[in-house]
Image (spheres, rainbow, N blue to C red):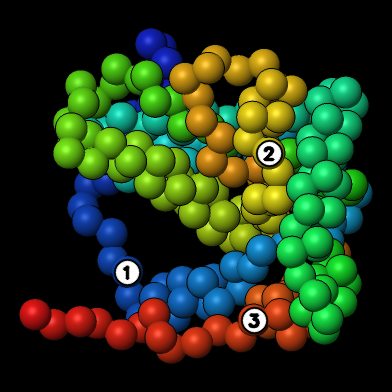
Amino acid sequence: MMKISSEGVLEQISPSCSPLFDDEFCARFEKLLVWRRDVRGFKPHPVPADLLEHLLDLVQLAPSVGNSQPWRFVQVESAEARASIRASFERCNREALAGFTGERARTYAGLKLAGLDRAPVQLAAFCDGSTLQGHGLGRLTMPEALTWSVVGAINILWLAARSRGLGLGWVSILDPSEVTQALNVPSSWRLIAYLCLGWPEEVHDTPELERLGWQDRTVQSRAILRR
C-alpha cells in the first residue's frame, strides 16, 4: 500500500508480513504480460481522474538509478498542444514512409501508428537530466541510466494500466525538439516517450505489428551468452 505524506513524499505502508505470491498470482501475472499490448485504437470514453492519479502513484514504485525518480510526466490537454503534436507526427510519418519501397512501403502505409486522434489521455514522459535527487549515485560512469529509469517507469505504467482494463500506446514517430517546444518544458528535460492512454477498442494477446505482417517475434533475443 502507498500513501502521500504531508510533505508530499510517497511512503510505503509496511505490511505485517511479507506477501505470498502463489502459483495463481504468478499465472495471472504471466497472463498480464501476454495481454500487455501497444494499443493504437481507443474508445473516446474518458479515464476517471482518480484512476489516472492512482496509476501515476504506482509509477513511483518503479526502480531508478540512485533512487533519483527522474521521470517527469506532462498531461497534454489543450487543443493547441495536441495539434502541434499531431503535426509533428504527420511530418515524421511522411518522412518515414519515404524511406520504404515496394511491399514494405504499402504495409507501412496501412499501419495505424498513432492513437493521437481519440486517446482521451496523452502523456509526454520526460527525463529530468538535471535532477539532484539521488546525489548522482550510479550515474558517473553510465549517465544514460537516468533514461533507462524513465523507461522502467513507463513499463510499470503500461502493466498497471492494463491490469485496470486500460490500453497504452507509445508514439515514437515524433520530433522530440518539436514536442519539447510545444509543451514548454525546461530545457534539461529530454523526451523519452509520448504515450496515449485510454480504453482500447479491442484487445489481443499478440502484437498488432505481428498480426499485420510487419514483424514477427523471434527467439534471437532469447539467447544468453556465457563467457
Q: Nearer the viewer, mark 1 or mark 2?
A: 2
Q: Residue furthest top?
A: 7
- In-image side of 145 versus 81 (left or right): left
Q: Compared to 4, does 2 lie above or below?
A: below
The image position of residue 162, as x and y in percent, is 62, 60
Q: Which element is circle 2 on?
A: loop
CA gap, disc 1 and disc 2: 42 Å
**Residue 21: mark in rendering:** 1
Which one is nearer the viewer's eye here, 37 or 96?
96
Category of crowding for the residue at label 2, using alpha-carbon neighbours closer than 10 angstroms: few (below 14), some (14–19), many (at least 20): some
Q: Which element is circle 1 on?
A: loop
**Residue 175: mark in rendering:** 2
The image position of residue 44, as x and y in percent, is 91, 49
- Which quarter of the rendering shows the C terminus? bottom left
Q: Compared to 225, does 186 lie above or below?
A: above
Earlier-in-chain disc, 1 versus 2: 1
Which one is nearer the viewer's eye here, 88 or 1?
88
- Residue 203 lies in what quarter of the image? bottom right
Residue ID for mark 3:
215
Q: Amino acid at mark 1?
A: Phe
CA gap, disc 3 and disc 1: 34 Å
Residue 99 seen from this side:
yes
- Residue 4 lies in what quarter of the image? top left
Q: Amino acid at mark 3?
A: Gln
Q: Residue furthest bottom?
A: 219
- In-image side of 205 versus 220 (left or right): right
Q: Residue at x 20, y 82 (%)?
A: 225
